[in-house]
Amino acid sequence: MITFVDITERHRVEERLEDHVEERTPALNDREQRLRTIFNSVPDAIVIAGKDGLIQAINPAGESIFGYAAGELIGHNIKLLMPSPYREKHDGYIARYLETGKARILGKRQEVSGCRQDGSRFPLELTITELSELGLFAGVIRDLTAKRRLEREVANASTLEQERIGREIHDGIGQQLTGLNILAVSLRNELTAAGFRDNRQLDEMIKQLNSLIGETRKLSCGLAPVSVGPRGLVGAIRKLADQVNESMGVACPFDDHHATVKFTEAMDATQIYRIVQEAVNNALKYADASRITIELTTMDGFIELTVGDDGKGFDLEAVQESDGFGLRIMRYRTGIVGGQLVIDTAPGKGTWVRLRLPRQALYLPAGVR
């Protein structure tokens, strides 16, 4: 038995499909060329990686920023572009996301550190997007080196100006007030010796002068709180802790683990002190804390300063989405000194502010580990 099937219509459909493909191919090629041109032309780095963390593509801007040729990166794990200790933790981040489906950083801009081919660290802004239909992740990276350099120059100029004003207040206004106080005391003694007994107004003037001298000293010290020396930062933080203990009635122990910290620029030490000061002030104003702890440690090539309290904590995401001016200032100062700021808090859980700096950013004696 022989069966015949008319396939004329099928041939017609196939011919129409072939014609459609031929018509669409130039458009698809044109679209692919446009996308490739955009990929290759944008000034920000774009890195495409799979769920296994292996790099599948990188644009010319990425090659320039990281110092690698594309062929040296494709097929390698993206953690090659990260400095320690983030490099060692990267695989855990991906595994945790694939297991839980909870995206902590996807779609959010964050400032982190990158690692160039020569091993140098540099600040960058990173935004990661998941291309779920392709099973890929795209990272858009902006080099913040020039921005940080400008911010450092501005901050350094501001710090120098604050120090100048602080010295003028201390050496000018402070000395004049001290001189007036000495004259007032001398006048009171002369009047007393001459038989005048009612010196209450003069005594009040001397009292207010002493108070004003104290406030002037606090103001000048506040403008330039850190002295440049082997223990300038440590000494300033210890003084801050003592002031909280004595003036605020809140326990504020400071453990420096006998670390000696020396900076090449006073501006760095001042910025770090301001971060610690802001964290302590926030704990005093908002946390209702009965105890604030400050700790300086060194580990894994980093120095870490931690300010913790036993207060009521807060919703970090809500603060970040709102004004959060104090938090933004702390992050800004952290970026200037090339560090990382981590805040661990929750309502009813207290707050821990951790500032981590690469050890090469400062000098530590060989005996400190």
Image (cartoon, rainbow, N blue to C red):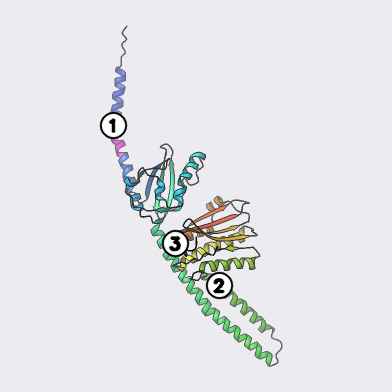
Asked whether 117 or 196 is in front, the reply is 117
Q: Secondary structure at mark 2?
A: helix
List the residue tagged with mark 3: 361
Classify the position of the N terminus by image quarter: top left
Q: Residues within 10 Å of mark 3 (few under 14, many from 20)?
A: some
Please say if 79 is above or below 193: above
**Residue 44: % across, % down:** 37, 51
The mark nearer the N terminus, 2 or 1, is 1
Q: CA distance from mark 3 to mark 2?
A: 29 Å
Query: Does residue 25 show up magenta in the picture?
Result: yes
Asked whether 316 or 263 is in front, the reply is 263
Which amino acid type corresponds to the residue marked 2 in the rendered image? Answer: Leu
Q: CA distance from mark 1 to mark 3?
A: 60 Å
Q: Residue furthest top?
A: 1
List the residue tagged with mark 2: 219
Please say if 183 is above or below 307: below
Span colored in magenta: 21-31
Q: Secondary structure at mark 1?
A: helix
Q: Quadrant of residue 203?
A: bottom right
Please say if 208 is above or below 302: below
Asked whether 228 or 311 is in front, the reply is 228
The mark nearer the N terminus, 3 or 2, is 2
List the residue tagged with mark 1: 23
